[in-house]
């Protein structure tokens, strides 16, 4: 697809008057979900941050700046979830594609919601990863 076609598509998405040309630029502020998640984390609104997190940022990108931002965002939210210990938020993360193999989140979840299923998944992960069992 050409740049012109992409910009036409973006103009349709944004609506009239939000994308100018010569040079191409946005005419009004745009807020990204990354900014929303980071702002909510800074405010201590972990549940709201988790709700705004739609998954890893541009997961297919290997651009160094994107990789760093993706890692910073996920690590920040993940750390806040573990520290907060909210079983529902931990379960949401653990059962998402990006959290299904997250040993530390599963440990935190099993600690606050020690169901047979959670303990079983944790044991399987520890065995698979060769991690020491923390009990």
Image (cartoon, rainbow, N blue to C red):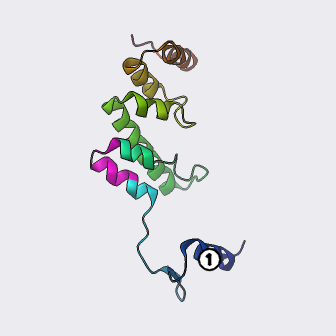
Q: Quadrant of the N terminus?
A: bottom right
Verify whether residue 44 appears in magenta. yes
**Magenta: main secondary structure:** helix
The image shows residue 26 at horizontal and vertical percentages of 48, 78
Pointer 1: residues within 10 angstroms few (<14), some, or many (20+)? some
Q: Residue at (40%, 13%) from the top-left corner?
A: 134
Q: Residue at (54%, 18%) from the top-left corner?
A: 121
| Region in magenta | 37-46
As drawn, 107 above or below 81:
above
Residue 128 placement: quadrant: top right
Q: Which residue is mark 1?
A: 7
As drawn, 89 above or below 62:
above
Residue toward you, 8 or 51: 51
The image shows residue 90 at horizontal and vertical percentages of 43, 31
So how many labels did they put on this image?
1
The image shows residue 58 at horizontal and vertical percentages of 56, 53
In the image, is 132 to the left or to the right of 42? right
Q: In the current view of this chain or complex, which residue is farthest to the top?
A: 135
Verify whether residue 103 appears in magenta. no
As drawn, 29 above or below 102:
below
Residue toward you, 16 or 23: 16
The image shows residue 20 at horizontal and vertical percentages of 52, 85
Q: Secondary structure at mark 1?
A: helix
Q: Residue at (54%, 36%) from the top-left corner?
A: 96
């Amino acid at each position: 697809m050409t740049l012109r076609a992409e910009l036409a598509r973006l103009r349709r998405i944004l609506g009239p008057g939000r994308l100018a040309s010569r040079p191409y630029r946005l005419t009004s502020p745009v807020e990204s979900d990354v900014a929303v998640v980071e702002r909510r984390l800074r405010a201590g609104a972990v549940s709201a941050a988790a709700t705004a997190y739609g998954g890893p940022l541009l997961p297919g990108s290997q651009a160094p700046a994107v990789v760093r931002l993706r890692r910073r965002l996920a690590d920040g939210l993940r750390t806040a979830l573990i520290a907060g210990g909210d079983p529902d938020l931990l379960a949401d993360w653990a059962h998402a594609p990006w959290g299904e193999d997250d040993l530390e989140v599963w440990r935190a979840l099993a600690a606050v919601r020690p169901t047979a299923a959670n303990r079983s998944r944790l044991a399987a992960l520890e065995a698979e990863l060769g991690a020491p069992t923390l009990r």
